[in-house]
Amino acid sequence: MIPNSLARPLHNLLSAALLLALALIAAGPKHTSAEDPSLAIDVGTSGNTGNAVGEIEDCISVATGEQFEVDVLILEVTDLLAWEIHLDYDPAVLTVVDHDVKLFQGANEGSSPIDISARLPNHSGFHTLSAFESSDPPRVDSGSGVLARVTLEATADGETEIALGQRDINNDDVLDRGTLMRDVDAAVIGDTNEDNFFDGEVTGAIAVVGDDCPPGYNVATPASSDPGDTQGWLYAAAAGMIGVIGVAAVVAIVVVRRRST
């Protein structure tokens, strides 16, 4: 529960940001980007950098208590400005303890990506990762690389899928959370059904704690990781809410700024 002393300022911040997003996006373009990128979870990070992709491995076997890194790869994207994804995993088996969302966008000289992801650690099973390019003029990013690198800790024996998730929060058959990417013109990248979320190819992976990977998977070798300092979990939900509206607001501001120059 968020302390009362922070509840009203947080509510005011969310309300103001939401109003800004709605007002500015309403004047923006409604078309979707014609580009067709894809996303993949790679549980073996070897060969992956901000602007390069190595062999993609789809299963990792670790011991309870072990920490390991996985990469969310973006493949063949054009003019990416802002994005939001949600790492979906079994919270009874894994915990997110760290993330880096600046590798792909930060690889472009002159870029200045800003992390607006959920706070750490995250025990919820649904971790929001999000960033936007803040440079002026914007240094948009194209190509392939590591969109996000996430450090996970194995907390109990078991097997879990690691995927990019979606949620219908209020059960109205309308998607509320999902993969969202926008380019510098505010076009939604990879949206084919006009729901503002990415509809392209997304490849997941699995993690097996306390046992071997099943046959048929390309098995990764775990790389040890130091998660560094972690933040309090009380603010995870609030940070995720800011991230949801943040992508729309940031892109709208960039579009308006470009039109005025």
Image (tube, helix red, strand yellow):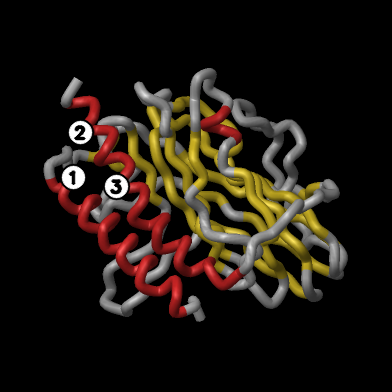
Q: Residue 26 appears at what percent x and percent y?
A: 14, 47
Q: Residues within 10 Å of mark 1 (few under 14, many from 20)?
A: some
Q: Residue 86 appears at what percent x and percent y?
A: 50, 58
Q: Could you tell me if residue 124 is visible in this image?
A: yes
Closer to us: 56 or 189: 189
Q: Residue 85 appears at what percent x and percent y?
A: 47, 53
Q: Which residue is mark 3?
A: 249
Residue visible at 55% across and 59% down in the picture: 87
Residue visible at 49% across and 25% down in the picture: 111
Q: Which residue is mark 2?
A: 256
Label 1 near label 2: C-beta < 8 Å?
yes
Q: Secondary structure at mark 1?
A: helix
Q: Residue 229 appears at what percent x and percent y?
A: 73, 55
Closer to us: 93 or 12: 12
User: Which amino acid lies under the numbered mark 1 shown in the image of this protein?
Assistant: Leu
Label 2 near label 3: C-beta < 8 Å?
no
